[in-house]
Amino acid sequence: MMAFFVVQRGSSLLTPLLALALLGLLRCATVSCSAAAAAATLLHHESYAGKSEFRTVNRKPLGSCVDPPSPYLAIDVGAAGPIPDEAFLQVTVSGVQRPDPSDWVAMITPSNSSVAGCPLSEVNYVETGDLANLPLLCHYPVKAQYLTSDPGYLGCKNAGCGKRDASGACTARTCAATLTFHVVNFRTDVEFVLFSGGFKAPCLLKRSGARRFANPASPLYGHLSSTDSKATSMRLTWVSGDGNPQRVQYGDGKSSTSEVATFTQDDMCSISVLPSPAKDFGWHDPGYIHSAVMTGLQPSQSYTYRYGSDSVGWSDTVKFRTAPAAGSDELSFVIYGDMGKAPLDASVEHYIQPGSVSVAKAVAKEIQTGNVDSIFHIGDISYATGFLVEWDFFLHLITPLASQVPYMTAIGNHERDYANSASVYVTPDSGGECGVAYESYFPMPAVSKDKPWYSIEQGTVHFIVMSTEHEWSEKSEQYNWMDEDLSSVDRSRTPWVIFIGHRPMYSSHGGILPNVDSNFVASVEPLLLNYQVDLVFFGHVHNYERTCAVYQGNCKGTPTTDKSGIDVYDNSNYTAPVHVIVGAGGFSLDNSPNKGEAWSLSRVSEFGYGKVHATRTDMLVQFVNSSSMEVRDQFRIVKGAPANKSLSLIIQ
């Protein structure tokens, strides 16, 4: 969803130009907007760089502890030896003489990152939106926990002895706390650092020393994507610390060699006077992204694969299923947006999406039933937003899903938008990533680099996936592509056309910034009607909402209710598309008004996902609550015999 800004107290920065930017009325696709974008970053906000108290740590000058640290302090990090690819590390802080509720532990990577105070570098962190002289660390802590997470800490229930006299009597009683940190293999070593003073005035007490992963080159986080509509090939993408080509072995003795890519700090976007998180304290080496295509497959068939090499090791063997080929008789898929990730421990982290874990677990259960052919994640993918290590945690979260069925994606504002990046919108929501990380981790069958729009057919459905963050105005490159693609649909092969993007055309949810861009609606909505698009999915707004068959804000068709109580839209006599928002994939939910606009037929503010089953004449769409796996809304779209060829409706 679009970031929102709050004016810093006492600031005079809210100029008329900024006011326009904040209202979402200023849009550009050239560097001419860079001045407005730079100014906008000077506002205190709760967006890409600050959703929790913890995330102000990295831009605060580090003070000295009032009291000297205990001479008995020690930090023990679980079992000795290297860390496996995933671990729940037991971190024990002992030797504390005076337990304080402000004591906390940060997980830092790499271990040579500075955790000193950086008051002279404050200008580098102005972009995060905090202009006050607040505490600052020189490096982004990946995770943090207060020692009070151990309920026995303040009461010193885990007492020890730091010093004994000659008789063996304890002369220095100490206290301890044990915390659990979930860690995945992000290739660089890790260190745990003890602070006091809380997140607002931290002072350093003790460092653990570096702990390394057992195999930084491990091949990890393999995820699939379809390459075309034939469903006879499948792309596998994975991450490794090894830059040499690796292989995917699949099927009956087949093998494909990976192409290897990476990106650097130099590839990240920034403003010269205000380095972005991705360019500065949020940077983390991504290792190497491997991608290989498995060919010679058959549609709707199951295969196994493993990936890696003899030198770095091999992944576990994974079973996957190809999608149905274009023109086959049915398709089942899951769709959601705005997912991100959340910690699997008690830590606070950058940009937590609280519903993401429940959605991932529920979709994994759906896949286990064998009734999911593919997944569409439609923007705001990881919410790393310039804190690059977060991509590893997100990829780890979705591996059980994306390793088994095609995981198709669309780009969102938190992957793309930044000053001087030619984004349609000037908000700094990508934290300087500017789509580079997204396109590296999720290579889709796109037009070309930084043109991440594509279409693909699976079963009875023609999907057209656009970028709401790239120029979409009439006669733009993307607009012309959408026009041409929609005009070429063969309805005798794929009777259903589903249009996908990130930012919606219809939403009942209000906010500081508008969720709907009227210019976007005016440019693109006529294409949907003209080519008789059946169903439209968007995210960006963090809830679920369904419309009537709507065009230009007016209901052109309303559903009837069948004997089962399900709304049914009859597209045998087409009137307009049905729009659905499925942005409830993980980010904190947006409330919906009790009474929406006339075109709004159903609104649910619960974490969940869409589930669609499409035959040649009937498409059932359900919204599923991820915690209970109960269907919270459902409807059908039906139509008679498909037309012989693509249809076009002339707008009067």
Image (cartoon, rainbow, N blue to C red):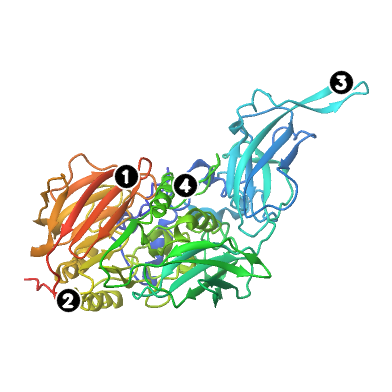
Residue at image mark 4: 352
The residue at which mark 1 appears reads as 590
Three-letter amino acid code of the residue under disc 1: Asp
Residue in front for this viewpoint, 267 or 440: 440
Q: Which of marks 2 and 3 is nearer the N terminus?
A: 3
Q: In which quarter of the image is residue 99?
A: top right
Compare marks 4 and 1 and give the one earlier in the sequence.
4
- Label 2, residues with CA under 10 Å away: few <14, some 14-19, many ≥20: some
- Nearest to N terminus: mark 1 or mark 3: 3
Alpha-carbon distance for marks 4 and 1? 15 Å
User: Which residue is rendered at x = 30% and y = 75% of the image?
Assistant: 478
* Front residue (pair 619, 189): 619
Q: How far apart are the two marked residues, 1 and 3, measured between alpha carbons?
A: 59 Å
Rendering coords of residue 118 (x, y %): 63, 51
Helix or strand or loop: what does disc 2 sit on? loop
Quarter in which the N terminus is drawn: bottom left
Q: Which kind of residue does numbered mark 4 sit on?
A: Ile
Q: Mark 2 points at which residue?
A: 646
| Dot in front, 2 or 3 | 2
Q: Residues within 10 Å of mark 4 (few under 14, many from 20)?
A: many
Q: Where is residue 102 in the image (x, y as percent from the top left)?
A: 61, 33
Instruction: Name the residue tied to disc 3.
Output: 169
